[in-house]
Amino acid sequence: MKPVIAFIKGDPLADRAVPATGMSARLTVFVAAAMAFLAVFVLALSLTAGRLASSWADDLAQTATLRLPADLEQTNAALRAAVTVLQTTTGVASARVLEADEQRALLAPWFGPDIPVESLPVPQLIEILPDETGYDAAGLRARLQAEVPGAVLDDHGAWREPLQAAAQRLRLVGWSVLALIGTVMAAMITLAAHASLAANAQIIRVLRLVGARDGYIARAFVRRFTLRAGLGAIIGTALALLVLQGMPEADVVGGTGADFGFVGLDWIWPLAIPVLSAIVAFAATRAAAARRLKEQT
């Protein structure tokens, strides 16, 4: 902790070698603020999308649907047989036959609210809720094929697996974009440090004449640019969080409860952005200062 405090306090004499204002100072603060602002929104988008996809996948994993043939003459017999099979299947907590109003609500987005479900050959649906242990889907399909010909068991796997894959890819894309943001920030700070070192070549030569070592001079530049980057990142992060807090709270894609932003422990990530920005600036400036001072020897 003491080295960190000493680094922040710095050496007033060495700090004179680094201008407190100027183009390089403004550029460092602006770049850090802009990159932090973008990083917060990339994190928010990635975490929200991943959370939404995971929520959908979890919801699909908790239910299954049995679809019976639409033949009206065989529906009642098939329905009784299907319910009997489900009630005697280990791992099935409950099996509920969907009413006509519920099926009408499912079809309403495509055919409107007034669709005459009773007069159309619409397959009868049964909602299946598994218990904690779950059921053997392959075994249940085999029983249904034997006892209820034409019945189709849909465990939503065709929907759930792509959602889970999408959630993983969104997180990967988010981290890749954050790595790109960090790389751009490091490059811009390196250019600013090179410019500042070149502009202060006369002061550096004087410091060397009075016995200052390159490490002493480099520390002054590293400290200034690290603090500037940290300050800029704090400003950018604060602005981004204010914008996020000002966004209206609304369910994404109706009724999921996945609001755009950070939830729970997710808040650790935006709060870590200024620290990570300072670390990037420290590493970039240290490498740039060492290389530039060696060239000016």
Image (tube, helix red, strand yellow):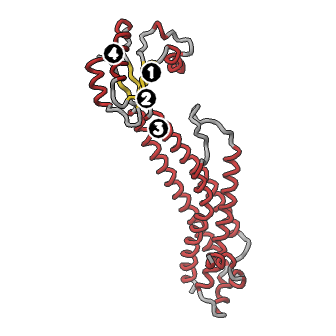
Residue 243 seen in render: yes
Asked if residue 186 is positioned above or below residue 133 in the image, the reply reads: below
Nearest the eye: 202 or 267: 267
Name the kind of residue labelled 4 in the image: Ala
Alpha-carbon span between mark 3 and mark 2:
13 Å
What residue is shown with label 4?
A: 81
Which of the two labelled residues, at mark 3 and mark 2, occupies the earlier sequence position? 3
Q: Secondary structure at mark 3?
A: helix
In this rendering, the label closer to the viewer, 3 or 4: 4
Name the kind of residue labelled 3 in the image: Asp
What residue is shown with label 2?
A: 129
Q: Which mark is residue 58?
A: 3
Determine whether, in the image, residue 194 is placed left or right of residue 53: right
Where residue 258 appears, x then y in whole percent?
58, 39
Alpha-carbon span between mark 3 and mark 4:
29 Å
Residue drawn at the location 37% of the way across and 34% of the way down: 134
CB atoms of marks 2 and 1 within 8 Å:
yes
Alpha-carbon span between mark 2 and mark 1:
8 Å
Which of the two labelled residues, at mark 2 and mark 4, occupies the earlier sequence position? 4
Which of the two labelled residues, at mark 3 and mark 4, occupies the earlier sequence position? 3
Q: Specify the quadrant that holds the C terminus.
A: bottom right
